[in-house]
Image (tube, rainbow, N blue to C red):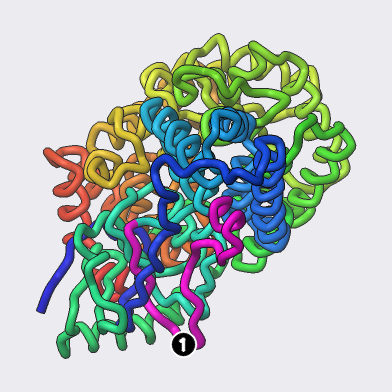
Amino acid sequence: MQNFQGVGVSPGRIIGSVRQMPKPVSEPPSGDRLAADVSPEDAVAGLKAAAQAVHDELKGRADTASGDGKAVLEATALMAKDTMLLKSASKLINAGSSAERAIWEAGASVSEMLHNLGGYMAERATDVLDVRARIVAELRGVPAPGIPSSDTPFILVAEDLAPADTATLNPAVVQALVTSGGGPQSHTAIIARSLGLPAVVAAHGVDDIADGTEVFVDGAAGFVAVSPTDEHRAAATAWAETSATLAEFDGNGTTADGHLVPLLANVGGAKDAVAAAALGAQGVGLFRTEFCFLERDTEPSVDEQAAAYKAVFDAFPGKKVVLRTLDAGADKPLPFLTDATEPNPALGVRGYRTDFTTPGVLERQLEAIARAASESEADVWVMAPMISTAAEAGRFASLCAAAGIQTPGVMVEVPSAALTAATVLREVGFASLGTNDLTQYAMAADRQLGPLAELNTPWQPAVLRLVQLTVEGAEQESSGREGAAKPVGVCGEAAADPALAVVLTGLGVTTLSMTARSLAAVGTVLKTVTLEQARELATLALSAPSATEARDWVRAKLPVLEELGL
């Protein structure tokens, strides 16, 4: 029996047959030249037509998707029309290269450049290579690379998946997902969680497993076994039975002793919001408004924005909806707002900072939010991403006040905001921890890289300490006035981990927001511990010398996780 250990990113215990991702599009021969009977002008036109076809196909798929999948497809579609990519390829064609060879080399250059930039831009490197392969396939008139078609369920195994592939995984056919690359916050991991697919990433060697091989996958433990044992089969059977009990959330996030921890949903638009409400979400902890802007060359009007926001608000009448203002830049470039030539966009003009270079866009967005809120029954809170200082928080609060927005807040995803939380929160009404970025910035670890998966986990004691400092800052800020501490929520992927949700509750976090499919599992586990027990587990995690030990120590104290296969 051969076993593989990776990083578990989405729980579930499944036994099934492996299907490997098909071989990628082959590289055009080095030095492949333009045919004698084809002019450079015609070859460039053909290349642009192929790129447009790829764009249209991806955009068409995006139009029928929602949430994270929709955003990923739209971003990848934009890459197919990337000016830098097509200009580079056109130059090579004019120098005598064939269209296939030109786009191949141009894609390699752009991908390498993005990878070397690190951070969010490194995430786009995979998109470029995916788009490159799709354009070459279009030029050859052959099917684009993708997930194998099958009439029977299977476990998908790959080196990694392109964002456009992860965005359209069909959970009715794909039983589980295993990759040898990627990291815990990669596109693959995030999409798997949103679909409720058991998934393991960074499991070195799994791409050598032969098609048709029966394997056992434990998405919580990050474990894959070839030739499953009777014990594995019993675990898979038990998961099939218990998973049904984790399918519904009763709409009441609380610990065993009645301490309220509202469980909210992360959404990207009206479809997500309606689905989250149906699953019992107690509100929205993260409304990613940039989804309304993707695939736009120009800024949407205030009327267009207001209509999009109101559709989300209307799904939660009388409940809290936390909206994040535009988080453009880095992996979410917008032609009318961001600069694609920045040397390090992950540390550049993104999120709130775009108001420094393109003033007016944020104020118009706030106007649209205020209008939508006034026409809705939702309790609308508004927060800015990439806030680093108290001065920035204060200016954002002033902009909100001018627009008529009552509850301004900030995202805490830059370590400086966590370290100075008391002064930052003096300026606004609440904070929400974006643990994906907070982890990446605190650990200086690109969240897409499999070799850095151990570093890039919110179980890192250093990251948990930043969470604690933020909560302590909120309490310190309230000490000089009457009333409770200002709310501090978590809207990053950390909240979807039931064990980590207990730790975050013990650290004093007031709300948890996650993909709607995780609500029931998190709610079930929270109800098994008292607030005092959660605090003890938080202290235990903080004292651990490593992320691995922090996770293992906490999980050992929560036997319900093993019982439920979480």
Asked whether 390 or 111 is in front, the reply is 111
**Which quadrant of the figure has residue 451?**
top left
Write down the region rendered in magenta. 134-159
The spot of residue 327 in percent (x, y) is 60, 31
Q: What residue lies at 16% left-to-right and 53% top-to-bottom? A: 553
Asked whether 502 or 35 is in front, the reply is 35
Q: What residue lies at 56% left-to-right and 66% top-to-bottom? A: 143
Left or right of residue 417: residue 291: right
What count of labels does the image hold?
A: 1
Q: What residue lies at 52% left-to-right and 37% top-to-bottom? A: 97
Asked whether the viewer can see residue 275, the reply is yes
Query: What's the amino acid at mark 1?
Result: Thr
Left or right of residue 350: residue 299: right
Asked whether the viewer can see residue 529, the reply is no
Callout 1: SS: loop
Left or right of residue 543: residue 382: right
Which residue position holds label 1? 152
The spot of residue 304 in percent (x, y) is 86, 40
Quadrant in which the C terminus appears: bottom left
Left or right of residue 564: residue 367: right
Q: What residue lies at 52% left-to-right and 79% top-to-bottom? A: 172
